[in-house]
Protein backbone atom coordinates (compact mmCIF):
# COMPACT_ATOMS: atom_id res chain seq x y z
CA UNK A 1 0.00 0.00 0.00
CA UNK A 2 1.24 3.48 -0.85
CA UNK A 3 0.31 6.11 1.79
CA UNK A 4 0.14 8.67 -1.03
CA UNK A 5 -2.61 6.80 -2.91
CA UNK A 6 -6.04 8.10 -1.88
CA UNK A 7 -7.71 4.94 -3.13
CA UNK A 8 -5.78 2.70 -0.75
CA UNK A 9 -5.16 4.91 2.29
CA UNK A 10 -7.67 4.90 5.15
CA UNK A 11 -7.40 8.62 5.87
CA UNK A 12 -9.96 11.44 5.63
CA UNK A 13 -10.44 14.83 7.26
CA UNK A 14 -7.45 14.47 9.56
CA UNK A 15 -8.46 11.02 10.88
CA UNK A 16 -6.48 7.92 9.91
CA UNK A 17 -6.47 4.22 10.65
CA UNK A 18 -4.23 3.57 13.65
CA UNK A 19 -2.27 1.06 11.56
CA UNK A 20 -1.01 4.04 9.53
CA UNK A 21 0.56 5.83 12.47
CA UNK A 22 4.12 6.75 11.52
CA UNK A 23 3.31 6.35 7.82
CA UNK A 24 0.96 9.26 7.17
CA UNK A 25 0.38 12.71 8.62
CA UNK A 26 -2.93 12.94 10.49
CA UNK A 27 -4.40 14.86 13.41
CA UNK A 28 -5.82 11.71 14.98
CA UNK A 29 -5.56 7.95 14.66
CA UNK A 30 -8.29 5.46 15.53
CA UNK A 31 -9.05 1.78 15.21
CA UNK A 32 -11.36 0.78 12.39
CA UNK A 33 -14.44 -1.33 13.19
CA UNK A 34 -14.68 -4.57 11.20
CA UNK A 35 -18.00 -4.97 9.40
CA UNK A 36 -19.19 -6.85 6.32
CA UNK A 37 -21.61 -6.37 3.46
CA UNK A 38 -25.08 -7.68 4.28
CA UNK A 39 -26.69 -6.36 1.08
CA UNK A 40 -26.28 -8.45 -2.09
CA UNK A 41 -24.04 -5.68 -3.45
CA UNK A 42 -22.98 -2.31 -2.06
CA UNK A 43 -21.35 0.61 -3.85
CA UNK A 44 -18.07 2.05 -2.59
CA UNK A 45 -18.41 5.72 -3.48
CA UNK A 46 -15.93 8.57 -3.75
CA UNK A 47 -18.00 10.81 -1.47
CA UNK A 48 -20.79 10.31 1.11
CA UNK A 49 -23.68 10.93 -1.26
CA UNK A 50 -25.98 8.53 -3.12
CA UNK A 51 -25.13 10.13 -6.48
CA UNK A 52 -21.35 10.24 -5.90
CA UNK A 53 -19.10 8.28 -8.27
CA UNK A 54 -19.01 4.55 -7.67
CA UNK A 55 -15.36 3.49 -7.64
CA UNK A 56 -15.74 -0.11 -6.45
CA UNK A 57 -18.27 -2.50 -4.98
CA UNK A 58 -18.60 -4.93 -2.11
CA UNK A 59 -20.43 -8.16 -2.79
CA UNK A 60 -22.30 -9.91 0.00
CA UNK A 61 -20.16 -11.08 2.89
CA UNK A 62 -17.04 -9.11 2.03
CA UNK A 63 -15.37 -7.32 4.92
CA UNK A 64 -15.27 -3.54 5.19
CA UNK A 65 -13.32 -1.87 8.00
CA UNK A 66 -15.18 1.30 9.08
CA UNK A 67 -13.24 4.32 10.37
CA UNK A 68 -16.19 6.70 10.87
CA UNK A 69 -19.79 7.35 9.80
CA UNK A 70 -21.32 10.49 8.32
CA UNK A 71 -24.79 11.24 6.93
CA UNK A 72 -25.79 7.58 6.65
CA UNK A 73 -22.49 6.51 5.08
CA UNK A 74 -19.60 4.53 6.54
CA UNK A 75 -16.09 5.55 5.51
CA UNK A 76 -13.74 2.61 5.43
CA UNK A 77 -11.63 0.12 3.52
CA UNK A 78 -12.50 -3.09 1.70
CA UNK A 79 -10.46 -6.05 2.84
CA UNK A 80 -10.70 -7.75 -0.58
CA UNK A 81 -8.65 -5.17 -2.47
CA UNK A 82 -7.83 -2.38 0.00
CA UNK A 83 -10.10 0.13 -1.71
CA UNK A 84 -11.19 3.08 0.41
CA UNK A 85 -14.48 4.95 0.17
CA UNK A 86 -18.02 5.44 1.43
CA UNK A 87 -20.65 2.69 1.75
CA UNK A 88 -24.22 3.22 2.94
CA UNK A 89 -24.31 2.19 6.59
CA UNK A 90 -27.46 0.11 6.16
CA UNK A 91 -25.61 -2.17 3.70
CA UNK A 92 -23.17 -3.27 6.44
CA UNK A 93 -23.50 -5.49 9.49
CA UNK A 94 -21.48 -6.54 12.53
CA UNK A 95 -20.06 -8.66 13.98
CA UNK A 96 -18.14 -10.18 11.09
CA UNK A 97 -19.23 -13.78 10.54
CA UNK A 98 -16.77 -16.44 9.42
CA UNK A 99 -17.63 -17.42 5.84
CA UNK A 100 -18.14 -21.11 5.14
CA UNK A 101 -18.90 -20.95 1.40
CA UNK A 102 -18.82 -18.63 -1.58
CA UNK A 103 -21.26 -18.32 -4.48
CA UNK A 104 -19.80 -20.24 -7.42
CA UNK A 105 -22.72 -19.79 -9.83
CA UNK A 106 -22.57 -16.63 -11.92
CA UNK A 107 -25.57 -15.49 -9.84
CA UNK A 108 -28.14 -17.12 -7.58
CA UNK A 109 -31.26 -16.23 -5.62
CA UNK A 110 -31.79 -16.31 -1.89
CA UNK A 111 -35.33 -17.38 -0.92
CA UNK A 112 -37.35 -16.65 2.22
CA UNK A 113 -37.97 -20.38 2.74
CA UNK A 114 -36.38 -23.60 1.42
CA UNK A 115 -38.77 -23.55 -1.54
CA UNK A 116 -38.27 -21.93 -4.95
CA UNK A 117 -41.89 -20.72 -4.91
CA UNK A 118 -41.34 -18.48 -1.87
CA UNK A 119 -40.36 -14.82 -1.85
CA UNK A 120 -36.93 -13.86 -3.15
CA UNK A 121 -34.78 -12.01 -0.61
CA UNK A 122 -31.94 -11.11 -2.96
CA UNK A 123 -29.86 -11.89 -6.04
CA UNK A 124 -26.27 -12.78 -5.19
CA UNK A 125 -23.27 -12.68 -7.51
CA UNK A 126 -20.31 -14.93 -8.13
CA UNK A 127 -17.85 -14.53 -5.27
CA UNK A 128 -20.34 -13.56 -2.56
CA UNK A 129 -19.23 -14.96 0.80
CA UNK A 130 -21.84 -16.75 2.89
CA UNK A 131 -22.15 -18.41 6.28
CA UNK A 132 -24.24 -21.59 6.15
CA UNK A 133 -26.36 -22.12 9.29
CA UNK A 134 -28.64 -25.04 8.37
CA UNK A 135 -29.56 -27.48 5.61
CA UNK A 136 -32.90 -28.72 4.35
CA UNK A 137 -33.03 -30.86 1.24
CA UNK A 138 -31.21 -29.11 -1.59
CA UNK A 139 -31.20 -25.79 0.29
CA UNK A 140 -28.98 -24.20 2.89
CA UNK A 141 -29.87 -21.29 5.13
CA UNK A 142 -27.42 -18.38 4.96
CA UNK A 143 -26.92 -16.00 7.87
CA UNK A 144 -28.29 -12.47 7.27
CA UNK A 145 -30.00 -13.63 4.09
CA UNK A 146 -32.23 -16.57 3.19
CA UNK A 147 -32.19 -20.04 1.69
CA UNK A 148 -29.78 -20.81 -1.17
CA UNK A 149 -29.49 -23.75 -3.56
CA UNK A 150 -26.47 -25.57 -2.11
CA UNK A 151 -25.24 -26.62 -5.57
CA UNK A 152 -24.59 -22.92 -6.31
CA UNK A 153 -22.09 -22.70 -3.44
CA UNK A 154 -18.52 -23.92 -2.97
CA UNK A 155 -16.75 -24.39 0.37
CA UNK A 156 -14.22 -21.69 1.23
CA UNK A 157 -10.74 -22.73 0.10
CA UNK A 158 -11.94 -24.76 -2.87
CA UNK A 159 -11.30 -22.66 -5.97
CA UNK A 160 -11.75 -23.07 -9.71
CA UNK A 161 -8.71 -23.70 -11.89
CA UNK A 162 -9.37 -21.88 -15.18
CA UNK A 163 -9.80 -18.17 -14.49
CA UNK A 164 -10.23 -17.33 -18.18
CA UNK A 165 -13.18 -19.72 -18.41
CA UNK A 166 -14.68 -18.04 -15.32
CA UNK A 167 -14.31 -14.64 -17.00
CA UNK A 168 -16.11 -16.02 -20.05
CA UNK A 169 -19.20 -16.68 -17.95
CA UNK A 170 -19.69 -12.92 -17.68
CA UNK A 171 -20.06 -12.59 -21.48
CA UNK A 172 -22.92 -10.20 -22.27
CA UNK A 173 -23.07 -8.66 -18.79
CA UNK A 174 -23.59 -4.89 -19.00
CA UNK A 175 -20.67 -2.54 -18.50
CA UNK A 176 -20.85 -0.77 -15.12
CA UNK A 177 -18.20 1.71 -13.98
CA UNK A 178 -16.78 0.46 -10.68
CA UNK A 179 -18.82 -2.76 -10.89
CA UNK A 180 -17.80 -6.19 -9.62
CA UNK A 181 -21.23 -7.87 -9.64
CA UNK A 182 -22.48 -10.34 -12.23
CA UNK A 183 -25.20 -7.92 -13.37
CA UNK A 184 -22.62 -5.29 -14.36
CA UNK A 185 -18.89 -4.80 -14.05
CA UNK A 186 -15.95 -2.95 -15.55
CA UNK A 187 -12.73 -4.05 -17.22
CA UNK A 188 -10.62 -4.45 -14.09
CA UNK A 189 -13.58 -5.82 -12.13
CA UNK A 190 -13.97 -8.84 -14.39
CA UNK A 191 -10.25 -9.63 -14.06
CA UNK A 192 -10.42 -9.36 -10.28
CA UNK A 193 -13.60 -11.41 -9.87
CA UNK A 194 -12.51 -14.20 -12.21
CA UNK A 195 -9.18 -14.54 -10.41
CA UNK A 196 -10.88 -14.45 -7.00
CA UNK A 197 -12.96 -17.47 -8.05
CA UNK A 198 -9.65 -19.29 -8.41
CA UNK A 199 -8.42 -18.08 -4.99
CA UNK A 200 -6.01 -15.62 -6.57
CA UNK A 201 -5.60 -12.07 -5.29
CA UNK A 202 -5.62 -9.14 -7.68
CA UNK A 203 -5.67 -5.33 -7.23
CA UNK A 204 -8.74 -3.33 -8.22
CA UNK A 205 -7.78 -0.73 -10.84
CA UNK A 206 -5.99 -1.13 -14.16
CA UNK A 207 -2.88 0.80 -13.16
CA UNK A 208 -2.54 -1.30 -10.02
CA UNK A 209 -3.04 -4.52 -11.98
CA UNK A 210 -0.49 -3.46 -14.57
CA UNK A 211 2.08 -2.89 -11.82
CA UNK A 212 1.16 -6.16 -10.06
CA UNK A 213 1.66 -8.68 -12.87
CA UNK A 214 5.00 -9.37 -14.61
CA UNK A 215 5.57 -7.87 -18.04
CA UNK A 216 5.96 -10.04 -21.12
CA UNK A 217 6.92 -9.27 -24.73
CA UNK A 218 4.10 -8.81 -27.23
CA UNK A 219 5.35 -11.81 -29.22
CA UNK A 220 4.99 -14.05 -26.13
CA UNK A 221 1.29 -13.34 -25.59
CA UNK A 222 -1.05 -16.28 -25.10
CA UNK A 223 -4.35 -17.28 -23.53
CA UNK A 224 -4.74 -15.84 -20.06
CA UNK A 225 -2.39 -12.89 -20.53
CA UNK A 226 -3.57 -9.32 -20.08
CA UNK A 227 -3.23 -6.42 -22.51
CA UNK A 228 -3.31 -2.91 -21.04
CA UNK A 229 -4.15 0.49 -22.45
CA UNK A 230 -4.30 3.72 -20.48
CA UNK A 231 -7.26 3.09 -18.16
CA UNK A 232 -8.27 -0.23 -19.73
CA UNK A 233 -7.44 -3.93 -19.58
CA UNK A 234 -8.53 -6.94 -21.63
CA UNK A 235 -8.08 -10.69 -21.25
CA UNK A 236 -6.50 -12.68 -24.08
CA UNK A 237 -8.57 -15.72 -25.09
CA UNK A 238 -5.78 -16.56 -27.50
CA UNK A 239 -2.99 -14.56 -29.12
CA UNK A 240 -5.43 -12.71 -31.40
CA UNK A 241 -8.72 -12.50 -29.46
CA UNK A 242 -9.74 -10.64 -26.32
CA UNK A 243 -12.59 -10.62 -23.83
CA UNK A 244 -13.23 -7.39 -21.96
CA UNK A 245 -15.87 -5.29 -20.27
CA UNK A 246 -15.84 -2.06 -22.23
CA UNK A 247 -17.77 1.14 -22.75
CA UNK A 248 -17.79 0.80 -26.56
CA UNK A 249 -20.02 -2.28 -26.50
CA UNK A 250 -21.35 -1.31 -23.02
CA UNK A 251 -20.98 -4.98 -22.18
CA UNK A 252 -18.53 -7.81 -21.69
CA UNK A 253 -17.64 -8.68 -25.27
CA UNK A 254 -15.27 -10.78 -27.36
CA UNK A 255 -13.50 -9.22 -30.34
CA UNK A 256 -10.29 -9.50 -32.37
CA UNK A 257 -7.36 -7.83 -30.62
CA UNK A 258 -6.33 -6.02 -33.81
CA UNK A 259 -9.78 -4.41 -34.15
CA UNK A 260 -9.73 -3.25 -30.54
CA UNK A 261 -6.23 -1.78 -30.94
CA UNK A 262 -7.30 0.19 -34.02
CA UNK A 263 -10.55 1.43 -32.48
CA UNK A 264 -9.03 2.43 -29.13
CA UNK A 265 -6.14 4.25 -30.77
CA UNK A 266 -8.56 6.11 -33.07
CA UNK A 267 -10.51 7.21 -30.00
CA UNK A 268 -7.40 9.01 -28.77
CA UNK A 269 -6.44 6.61 -25.97
CA UNK A 270 -3.31 5.45 -27.73
CA UNK A 271 -1.60 2.13 -28.41
CA UNK A 272 -1.42 -0.69 -25.84
CA UNK A 273 0.93 0.02 -22.96
CA UNK A 274 2.03 -3.60 -22.81
CA UNK A 275 1.20 -7.18 -21.89
CA UNK A 276 1.29 -8.96 -18.54
CA UNK A 277 1.40 -12.62 -17.52
CA UNK A 278 -1.13 -13.69 -14.88
Image (spheres, helix red, strand yellow):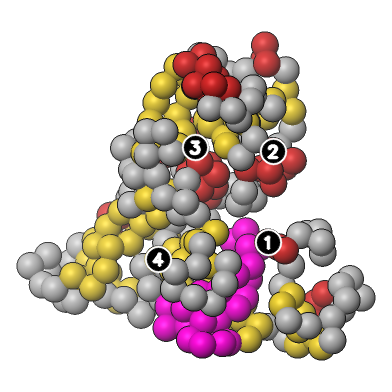
250 or 17: nearer the viewer? 250
Residue 7: give its label: 1
Mark 2 is surrounded, within 10 Å at the Cα level, by few (under 14), some (14 to 19) or many (20 or more) other residues, namely many
Q: Quadrant of the N terminus?
A: bottom right
Residue 272 is one of the magenta-drawn residues: no
At a point 36% along the width and 57% down the height, the residue shown is: 125
Circles 3, 1 touching at the beta carbon (< 8 Å): no
Give residue 41's mark: 4
The residue sitting at 7% across, 67% down in the picture is: 117
Above or below 183: residue 12: below
Q: Decide if residue 20 is on the left or right side of residue 11.
A: right
Tell me if mark 4 has few (under 14), some (14-19) or many (20+) residues whose alpha carbon lies within 10 angstroms of its own. Answer: many
Real-space CA distance between mark 4 and mark 1, rounded to the nearest whole angstrom? 19 Å
Identify the mark nearer the N-term, 3 or 1. Answer: 1
Residue 245 picture location, percent across and down: 44, 38
**185 and 237: which is toward the camera:** 185
What residue do we see at 47% from left, 46% from top?
186
The numbered mark, 1 or 2, whose residue comes first in the sequence reads 1
The answer, for residue 195, to whether it is visible in the render is no
Distance between the alpha carbons at the discs numbered 3 and 2: 17 Å
Residue that carries the numbered disc 2 in the rendered image: 210
Between disc 3 and disc 1, the foreground one is 1
Name the secondary structure under disc 2. Answer: helix
The circle on residue 247 is none
Amino acid sequence: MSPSDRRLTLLRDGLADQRLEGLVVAERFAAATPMQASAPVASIRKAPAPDAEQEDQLVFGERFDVLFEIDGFAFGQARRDGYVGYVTSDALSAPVLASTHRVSAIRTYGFSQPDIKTAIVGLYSLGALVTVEAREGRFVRVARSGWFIEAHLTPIGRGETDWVAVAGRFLGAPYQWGGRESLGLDCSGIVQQALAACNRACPRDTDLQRAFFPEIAEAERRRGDLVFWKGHVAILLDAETILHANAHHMAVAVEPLAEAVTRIEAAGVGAPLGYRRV
